[in-house]
Amino acid sequence: MGDLTDLLQYRKEIAARFIKGLGLEIGALHEPLIVPDNTIVKYVDRLSVPELRTHYPELAAKKLVDVNFIDDGEVLSTIPDNSQDFIISNHMIEHCKNPIGTIENHLKKIKPGGVLYYAIPDKTYTFDKGRLLTQYGHLLEDYYEDHDQMPHYIEWAKHVNKLNEPETQVQAKLLYDMNYSIHFHCWNAETMLYFIIKTKEFLKEIFTIELYTVNEIEIIFVLKRKT
């Protein structure tokens, strides 16, 4: 397995092929994507930098990117439609409560011919490995209905933090009240590809799959909005 430098280098090489113009990166925190020269990136997060430092004390020693837009990355309500050449979201989709709706919203924000650059962790190699893979039917339910997220927090406390009752319920309630950004969903390479193909069909072929590749412990894919 390669180290972090190898992973970031591979991301950079892919970015050199697909990223150009002016766009956004969502949730970059301390590891923004390295993009080609003359590319302009503005950063989106749901919290300001001071709030992020409070929310993620484990990043206290890290330099965080300046946040240009405080917004819900699933919705991007402050960003005009058809305004961006690209949107980058690395290790963000798994944090989304409605992944299909997130991709749909991102496609609206980029121009025809623009691209979405996503990387997600393969759950096989992460703390998610003990969890069940997210099924597409569940994602459709999330698209059509605004579900209570407490079951996700309970699953997280039980299978990721490996707590027993009643500790599971206590931590789940704490994280829920904080609106803490857990991995609401998880995939491996096979189920992620299925998710993208089915979402392409569901959204009436509005995008093409320009790239789908495995980067050691993560999956990278690039989607292009049709003109």
Image: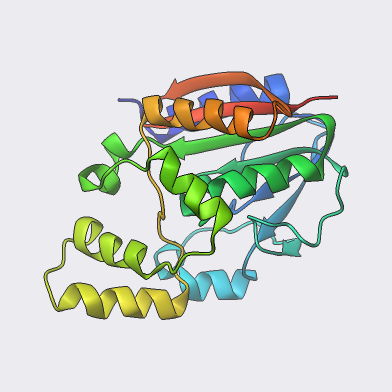
Give the x, y percent position of residue 54.
49, 76
Identify the image quadrant of the N terminus. Answer: top left
Name the residue rendered at 29%, 47% in the picture: 128
Q: Position of residue 21 (x, y in %)?
A: 84, 33
The colour scheme is rainbow
Give the residue at x 51% y 46%.
140
The answer to whether 97 appears left or right of 151 in the picture is right
With respect to residue 214, does 124 lie above or below? Answer: below
Q: Is residue 218 above or below residue 88?
A: above
- Answer above or below: position of 187 versus 140: above
Q: Identify the image quadrant of residue 33.
A: top right
Q: Is residue 82 left or right of residue 29?
A: right
Decide which of 51, 105 is in the foreground and name it. Answer: 105
Res 183 visible: yes
Residue in the image at 58% along x and 33% along y: 199
Closer to the camera in the image, 50 or 194: 194
**Can the viewer see residue 30 in this picture?**
no
Q: Is residue 80 above or below residue 4?
A: below
Observer-nearest of 49 and 63: 49
- Residue at 69 percent across and 19 percent down: it is 17
Residue 135: % across, % down: 38, 40
Nearer-the-camera pick, 99 or 33: 99
Please state the total of marks drawn on the protein image.
0
- Give the quadrant of residue 205: top right
Location of the C terminus by quadrant is top right
Residue 101 x %, y %: 62, 49
